[in-house]
Image: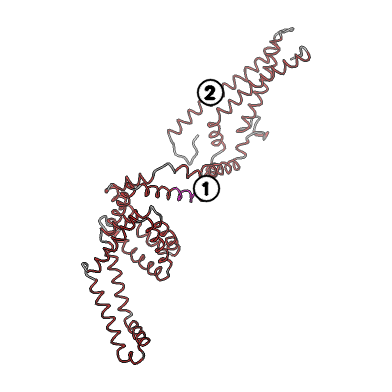
Amino acid sequence: MTSPDESFDPLREQERAADRRTLIRWRVYAGLAMAGTLAATIGLYALPDPRPFAIDLAHAAAKAGFVGAVADWFAVNALFRHPFGRWTRIGGLLPRQKQRLAGGMGRFVARQFFTPDSIRRAVEGVDVGAAVGRFLSDPEAARRTAIALAPFVAKLLEALADGRAREVLRRLLPRLVSGPEAGPVVARLLRAFLDGAHHQDVFSEALARLKATLAANEEKLKAAIEARVAEQGGAMVRWVAGAWIARKVLATLNAELARIEPGDSDLRAAFDAWISHEIERLEKEPERAAELGAALGRALSHPAVALWAEDAVLRLAQLARFDAEREDGRIVTALAGLLGNLGRSLAESEASRAGLNRLIEESIAAIAPAAQSRIEAFVAEKVRSWSDEDLIERIELKVGRELQLIRLNGTLVGAAVGALLYGALSLIFGRVPV
């Protein structure tokens, strides 16, 4: 019988058919044993007295065996059905206790098989890092993955702008990049960023924001410079040269910013050289990753940096929403490069693979408590949804052979005990009636 909420599965039906045949076979064996003891009990009365001792011993064994067979037949059937009719309310233990059984099964499955330790043991031998490395090392696979992930970039950026997600990132990001095995991975990601010249886009954006800020606050900056001149040189110096010094400082600053703006400027080249040097340090000095993590933690904790990061992330999310739809867009290209470098790093570095495997193990183990309650509720609700007939069939088909063996063994053990008891009584008191 298949429950209404399950689709037809030929393989499952074949397994159930095999279980039914096994159950019927062992039920026949147990029934024949009970019928045999009953036949012997009745038939041996037909033999006239005096009877040989062996016949009386067999008669006593048959009687005790039949009693044991009937008792075990009742016990086994009372689990599932009402042997003497439903009106007697004797039996049907499992259907009547279905609610308790459902809760117990849910707790058993969740608490025995979905504990953090059991999940960790189950996944610790699986080298996910190697599999991911092999997959992402293929450029075409990395590009397909990038195309699939690109639509989620905008949503991810919008989520990061949310206060709670930003707080999680602030706590998590320094930890991710500060491990000793994280240095080579971060270095490869930064090198991909550098090779694609994406850092220059960031540099240009920061430069444009700085120039816009200076232009919007020029009068405030002039007043601040004049106040500083007065503080250092007195009111006379401020009156004579304060305004001139302020204009000179701002003009020089704007000139330097204009000199930086071209793509081939010396400062941009120096910026490239500095990033390359830092990438090499990350590759060769494990402690540099820890310093980077600490610096990120301090920076992200500053209110001004957090406000700037939120604004920058929102702007990036707006750009990403349009760019992600293009398979040749910047997001897909950047993601493909990052994923390819990540795959090569995992393929070449055992430490990187071990770090990823450990992260996956700990992540899965961390969600185990929440998963336990969900699994417990799911299993319990599933069992409660079964009809009484379906519940009986499912359990009986799985443990029916063992239950029929109990019936068969009860018959044999009863016969053996009956024979031993009759022999002992005859030894003590002489021939006793059967």
Q: Amino acid at mark 2?
A: Arg
Disc 1 to disc 2, C-alpha distance: 39 Å
Q: Are marks 1 and 2 in contact (CB under 8 Å)?
A: no
Query: Relative to residue 110, is residue 260 drawn left or right?
Result: left
Report the residue marked by disc 1: 372
User: Which quadrant would residue 232 be assigned to in this image?
Assistant: bottom left
> In the visual, does 193 lie left or right of 419?
left
Stretch in magenta: 361-369
Residue beneath the point at 50% across and 29% down: 19
Q: Which mark is residue 400?
A: none
Q: Is residue 297 above or below residue 377?
A: below
For residue 342, side relative to residue 73 (left or right): left
The mark that comes first in sequence, 1 or 2, is 2
Q: Main secondary structure of the magenta part?
A: helix
Q: How far across and how far down the image is residue 290, in percent?
A: 40, 59
Q: Amino acid at mark 1?
A: Gln
Q: Which residue is mark 2?
A: 25
Camera-side residue of 314 and 23: 314
Q: Residue 226, how many percent across, how many down?
A: 34, 86
Can residue 362 be found in the magenta stretch?
yes
Q: Position of residue 378 (x, y in %)?
A: 52, 46
Depth check: give the residue in front, 433 or 237: 237
Residue 206 magenta-highlighted: no
Q: Residues within 10 Å of mark 2 (few under 14, many from 20)?
A: some
Quick one: 346 or 370, which is closer to the camera?
A: 346
Secondary structure found at label 1:
helix
Asked which quadrant contains residue 300, the reply is bottom left
Q: Give SS at disc 2.
A: helix
Establish if 173 lies above or below 430: below
